[in-house]
Structure formats: C-alpha cells, structure tokens
Image: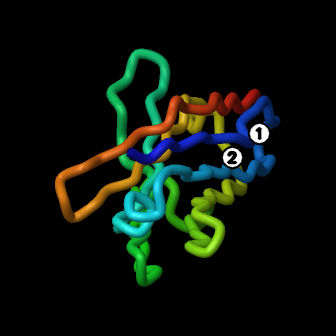
Amino acid sequence: QVQLVESGGGLVQLGGSLRLSCAASGSVFSLKAIGAMGWYRQGPGKQRELVATITNGGSTNYADSVKGRFTISRNNAKNTLYLQMNSLKPEDTAVYYCNADTPYGWNYWGQGTQVTVSS
C-alpha cells in the first residue's frame, strides 16, 4: 500500500503562483513499484481531469489548458511529486489530487488539496 499526502494548496490572486507537493509513503516494495505519477483536478461542478503526468524517467505530459504555466517534477529519492503553478487563473480553481500508478494494477490517490484563485 502507498499513502499519498498533498500539501501546498491555498488562496491566491489572479496571476499568482503556488507549488503543490505530494509525499508518498509505504513499504519499500510499494514505493519502488510506483511508475508514472500525476496531478488531476476537479473544479466545482466538473469532472476530474488530468493536469499533468510524469514517468519515472522524467517524461512529462500536460493538459493544453496548463501548458506553459504549470511544471510537474518529482524527486524519486524523496518519494515526492511537485506541481509548480504560475500565472494562475480563476478557472484553475479546483481540488488537486495526486495519483501514483504501478505496473501491477495498483493505483493510488491522495485526499486532495484545494486551490482557489480569486480575480
């Protein structure tokens, strides 16, 4: 089992920045099994959507809506995933969730952290 805990959310003004973190914990075997990780978000009245993903090797993928503004990164030695969010817009307001996938079919989610962007 892997536990994911997000942090770094909060209230920010239009054009501001936030850095989200997601700390993974669990057994050594479970942590080593983690492959791709990602950030997803769910805005008010909306379905959960992909924000960005990153593989173990560092290959990244972004939703078109965040390209050029958000940067996903990970520190495998610290078992931590990050999301640097710049030039934030009101439409970025959502609960942001961390996700970890494994090649064994196990998939884990964090509890989410609220990001609110005011205009």
In the rendered structure, the answer to whether residue 81 lies left or right of residue 110 reads right
Say how many tags the image has: 2
Quadrant where the N terminus sits is top left
Q: Position of residue 24 (x, y in %)?
A: 55, 52
In the rendered view, tell whether residue 118 sits above or below residue 67: above
Report the disc number at residue 29.
none
Whether pointer 2 and pointer 1 mark residues with C-beta atoms closer than 8 Å, the reply is yes
Quadrant where the C terminus sits is top right
Q: Residue furthest top?
A: 45
* Badge 1: residue crowd in 10 Å (few <14, some 14–19, many ≥20): some
Q: Residue at x 62, y 51 (%)?
A: 23
Q: Residue at x 71, y 56 (%)?
A: 86
- State how far apart marks 2 and 1 are (Cα): 6 Å
What residue type is disc 2 on? Leu
Colour convention: rainbow
Q: Position of residue 33 (x, y in %)?
A: 34, 66
In the rendered view, tell whether residue 116 sits above or below residue 44: below
Q: Residue at x 47, y 50 (%)?
A: 39
Circle 2 sits on which residue? 88
Circle 1 sits on which residue? 14
In the image shown, does 5 or 33 lie closer to the viewer?
Answer: 33
What residue type is disc 1 on? Leu
Label 1: which secondary element: loop
Q: Position of residue 97 (x, y in %)?
A: 49, 39
Residue 48, quarter of picture: top left
- Using the rendered image of the protein, determine whether residue 38 is visible from the camera's viewpoint: yes
